[in-house]
Image (spheres, helix red, strand yellow):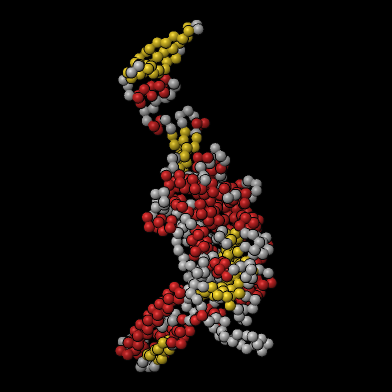
Amino acid sequence: MAIYVEKIPNRSSPPAVLIRQAWREGKRIRRKTLANISKLPPAAIAGIRSVLKGGVVFDSLDQAVSIRRSLPHGHVAAVLGLCRQIGLPRLLHRKRSRSRELALACVVARVLFPASNLASARFLSTDSPGSSLGSLLGLGPVSGNELLANLDWLRQRQPWIQRSLARRHVQDGSLLLYDVTSSYFEGRCCPLAASGYNRDGKRQLVCGLLCAADGCPVAVEVFPGNTADPGTVAALVRLIRERSGIESVVLAGDRSMLTTARIREDLGPAGLDWVSALKAADLRTLLKQPKPDPNNPAQDPRAPLRPGELVPDQMAEIHSPDFPGERLLVCLNPRLKAERARKRESLLRATEEILERIADMVRRRSSPVLRKGKDAINRRVGREANRKLVEKHFTIEVSDEELRWSRKQGSIEAEGRLDGIYMVRTSVAQDKLAAGEAVAACKRLARVERAFRNLETDGLQLRPACLYDDEHVRGHAFLCMLAYYVEWHLRRKLAPLLFEDAGREAADARRESPVEPAQSSPDAEAKAAGKRTPEGLPAQSLETLLEHLKTLTLNEVTLPGGDGSEFPLVSQASPLQAKALELLGVDPEKITSSGKPA
């Protein structure tokens, strides 16, 4: 016998809704109407139908389901899903193990929640989770000492991982970008930093970062704190050859690092090509006439660099016996020329105001210190006259009664001759690297500077380092580099939603052009003006977008009826969250415990 709700058509009138009873008598089915509920609201009718089918009626929602825990999940699903797309787990190690899962968790946590080892352990551990990351990877309890030991494991894997990154993003003969920065310590430090101090008196170490031409990091190296920038080049050569497995590259480096000595002693013997720029002192040598060479009657007696003959925004290639075997590419930027002239004049006037103030005190004898005579006045001038760094352009005369000065017009004009001029030097032949490409390669060093900004100030927290062992510090720097590797991919995929140029490659091409001024793409200008994307979604920084994704939670839900009724339930995504996950190609509902598809 069964009792059910049945809807009976009634010609042109509304259908009749009946509670009926049915039973079998032999081969026949008998039916009986128990009640007519046609006048009840549809919701009440649906409730009665559900109850008759075996459903349960509760007085309140919390009697129907229970949410045991709700964890921030959207940002974890986004970053972890991206890590799997770019093959980071296999990059860490081919075989799955707890060490690999811990390393992957530390990389994701460094992007989302950069903190000390103890705080990261609390964040990942399942008994005090800060997100769904620990449960997704099935980590269970995690301790700070375990994360320290995992840094040792990651440090041992570093040569193989960097070699794999180089194979992915660098080919023989391609461009590599290199720059260095420093990281300071709080409290007790490791021996690496024992010999170096920064301007604030804190112990520091030096960190060198190697990137592909598009700014993707491929290798990192840590040096003692007292290592000068040029002193890292020899280690860089070994890094390229031994760890990265690359035989032929073009290395782009800062002018203060790829000095003439380092080019001659390190890069030349290693057979590496390079691109750099000339310092101001080297530019001044090119303004002088060359010494006569009796063996070369066709020698040009004029100076190699003649600023008056340069065409604005046009490249010119010159040669000088002071730089044998090198191509020197020079360009005059008229906008930079005008700006430097304006700034120099402003600094000169500011220095004259400082000198005038001191001279007025000398004349009026208003300062007791200056009444002591010439030596006291000289000390005051020495302390204040070079505050704007242009004292070299003044002739200053001091006596017991008076302070006089005048501008060195010859010195000012000589410095002004180089305004707006920049010169790139390279060992690569013309048929392999055109002039515009060489200048663009040198300007791409801005991408390494962008990487250091992200590592130091934008959240990955390369510094301050709170580790006391050299190998742990090196492992920490490598972990931060891997986190930036993930963030680099994250920014590229989420660019349509970020306050970054949606046409980043086109914008970089314009910015690196030797003749065109830097411009933003129309999409970037529209986002900057309206603070919204073309689809009408609010534009974000990467940090605020990850914070918004964090509100997409993973809930542990249980039903009445025992412990076996627990299941995960992901909250509904907002339009912005849905768009971000769509750009990343991630479905947060398909990631459950241990990271396996549901």
Residue 450 position (above or below residue 42): below
Q: How far across and down, in percent of the image, does residue 189 sit?
A: 55, 64
- Snapshot quadrant of residue 176: bottom right
Q: Residue at x 34, y 84 (%)?
A: 357
Regarding residue 461, the answer to whether it shows in the image is: no
Regarding residue 245, the answer to whether it shows in the image is: yes
Q: Is residue 580 left or right of residue 44?
A: right
Q: Residue at x 46, y 35 (%)?
A: 557
Please identify the quadrant where the N terminus is shown.
top left
- Snapshot quadrant of residue 297: bottom right
Residue 478 vs residue 251, the one in the foreground: 251
Q: Is residue 551 left or right of residue 320?
A: left
Q: How far across and down, in percent of the image, does residue 86 sit?
A: 58, 50
Q: Residue at x 40, y 85 (%)?
A: 380
Residue 402 vs residue 439, the one in the foreground: 439
Q: Is residue 16 left or right of residue 243?
A: left
Residue closest to the far bottom: 400
Residue 148 position (above or below residue 365): above
Residue 266 position (above or below residue 554): below
Residue 412 vs residue 292, the one in the foreground: 292
Q: How far across and down, in percent of the image, does residue 338 sit?
A: 43, 76
Please identify the quadrant where the C terminus is shown.
top right
Q: How many marks?
A: 0
Q: Residue at x 51, y 59 (%)?
A: 505
Q: How far across and down, in percent of the image, does residue 411 sit?
A: 46, 86
